[in-house]
Image (cartoon, helix red, strand yellow):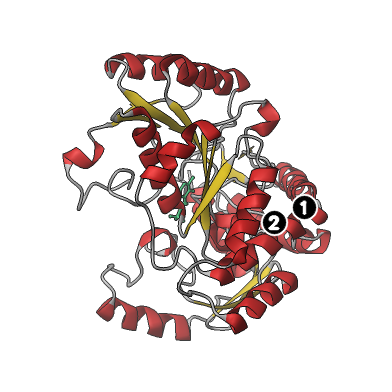
């Protein structure tokens, strides 16, 4: 039985006429690179579930690609946002929430002496780069090859619409390879404003890789030695691994952090935090936006962070993630399939061994979907605190059916 797609397909056809992408939708949410059958359009979300425009419901293992950390439409977050919306959202200046949120972030993240707020993760990483350059008066920034830091010309993964000059001061190194970062510094003749790094390697299309603590400490020491800023891009992992920042447990504190996604439980807000040493430089750059001060998202963020903290959301997501990981391991073994699960359990990813063209993984995703589970075959997944044992068990029913389909077709999928 296949899923109903009538409304979806009608919208896809209309979108293709008036939106620029081949199948209508652009960017990470386009279904163009997904196996057939994935819905493009959604109607609603509630807790750990999303519903597409045709009324099909799925346990959601993407959490809107990260932002939804307490579950869709979390009552306390929705109430805080609605209360502020009744007062006004974008006014002639910020509201009290900007101060409260900056107080909360600087009290939470050990490195943070100040905070500023933006809208998207790309804004936050871009501001970090500007602050580092303003502080050092230098040009080059070291970026790990393949890492995603946003869609501005300096970091977008596709070169169309960019010019060489946009990227010529961004110098590649390899994640978890300190020697490659040191060599990149040498190539820049010491002109390095910053090193930007993700807390772990979560490049789309690859198995995830945790940071070697020696690498993290080594990058910190390298930045100290050459007087460059260490920028942690915590946009994707922030508030899922540790409230103080994802490298806090390693004892490695950045000079600047970019935050986004989980910060507002789906409301549009991102943030930059930094140390006192960079405060003056941060005050000199001109970075702003019409919606950067909107109070609704800040209210949502305040409630998201306090609720996560009160509920020990990180521990809840770890428990749920472990239950999922153990379940997948058990099921794969029972079906005689070899899988690889990588990354932190609360930001899981799974691939099949000996699946060079990801044919097994594609079928797995399609069959999970047909059985009521939304996951992405080539991007890491996300858990939220709404993923109760029952939701994980429901997800595991779908994955069991999906493993069964893969096992059944394993010869053809070689
Ligand atoms: N950095 C990382 C690590 C990300 O995962 C993302 C988004 N996937 C970004 C930056 C950019 O965030 P946004 O899409 O909100 O601009």
Coordinates of residue 251 in the picture (x, y in percent): 67, 26
Indicate left or right for 312 with 297 as reference.
right
Q: Tell me the tag on residue 187.
A: none
Report which quarter residue 63 is drawn in: bottom right
Task: State the residue position of label 1.
Answer: 309
Report which quarter residue 183 is drawn in: top left
Coordinates of residue 84 in the picture (x, y in percent): 62, 76
Task: State the residue position of label 2.
Answer: 305
Q: Secondary structure at mark 1?
A: helix
Coordinates of residue 211 in the picture (x, y in percent): 58, 28
Indicate left or right for 307 with 245 as reference.
right
Q: Is residue 374 visible?
A: no
Q: Is residue 163 visible?
A: yes
Gap between marks 2 and 1 measured at Cα: 6 Å
Residue in the image at 80% along x and 60% along y: 388
Coordinates of residue 170 in the picture (x, y in percent): 30, 33
Indicate left or right for 66 with 159 as reference.
right
Task: Check the image and report above or below for 174 versus 343.
Answer: above
């Amino acid at each position: 039985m296949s899923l109903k797609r009538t409304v979806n397909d009608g919208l896809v056809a209309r979108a293709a006429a008036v939106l620029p992408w081949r199948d209508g939708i652009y960017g990470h949410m386009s279904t163009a690179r997904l196996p057939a059958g994935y819905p493009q359009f959604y109607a609603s979300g509630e807790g750990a579930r999303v519903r597409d425009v045709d009324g099909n419901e799925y346990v959601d293992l993407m959490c809107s690609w990260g932002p939804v950390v307490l579950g869709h439409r979390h009552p306390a977050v929705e109430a805080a946002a609605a209360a502020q919306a009744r007062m006004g959202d974008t006014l002639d200046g910020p509201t009290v929430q900007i101060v409260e949120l900056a107080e909360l972030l600087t009290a939470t993240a050990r490195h943070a002496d100040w905070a500023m707020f933006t809208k998207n993760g790309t804004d936050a990483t871009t501001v970090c780069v500007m602050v580092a350059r303003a502080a050092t008066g230098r040009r080059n920034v070291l970026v790990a090859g393949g890492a995603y830091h946003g869609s501005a010309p300096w970091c977008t993964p596709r070169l169309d619409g960019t010019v060489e000059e946009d990227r010529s001061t961004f110098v590649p190194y390899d994640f978890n390879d300190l020697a490659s970062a040191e060599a990149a510094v040498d190539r820049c003749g010491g002109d390095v404003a910053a090193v930007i790094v993700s807390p772990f390697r979560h490049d789309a299309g690859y198995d995830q890789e945790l940071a070697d603590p020696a690498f993290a400490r080594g990058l910190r020491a390298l930045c100290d030695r050459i007087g460059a800023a260490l920028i942690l891009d915590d946009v994707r992992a922030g508030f899922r691994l540790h409230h103080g920042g994802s490298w806090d447990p390693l004892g490695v504190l950045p000079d600047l952090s970019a935050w986004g996604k989980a910060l507002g439980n789906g409301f549009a807000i991102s943030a930059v935090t930094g140390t006192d040493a960079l405060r003056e430089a941060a005050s000199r750059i001109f970075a702003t936006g019409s919606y950067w001060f909107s109070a609704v998202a800040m209210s949502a963020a305040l409630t998201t962070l306090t609720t996560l903290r009160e509920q020990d959301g990180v521990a809840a997501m770890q428990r749920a993630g472990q239950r999922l990981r153990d379940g997948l391991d058990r099921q794969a073994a029972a079906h005689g399939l070899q899988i690889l699960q990588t990354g932190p359990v609360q930001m899981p990813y799974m691939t099949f061994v000996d699946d060079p063209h990801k044919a097994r993984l594609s079928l797995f995703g399609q069959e999970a979907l047909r059985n009521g589970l939304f996951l992405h075959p080539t991007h890491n997944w996300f858990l939220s605190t709404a993923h109760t044992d029952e939701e994980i068990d429901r997800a595991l029913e779908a994955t069991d059916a999906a493993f069964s389909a893969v096992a059944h077709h394993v010869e053809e999928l070689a």
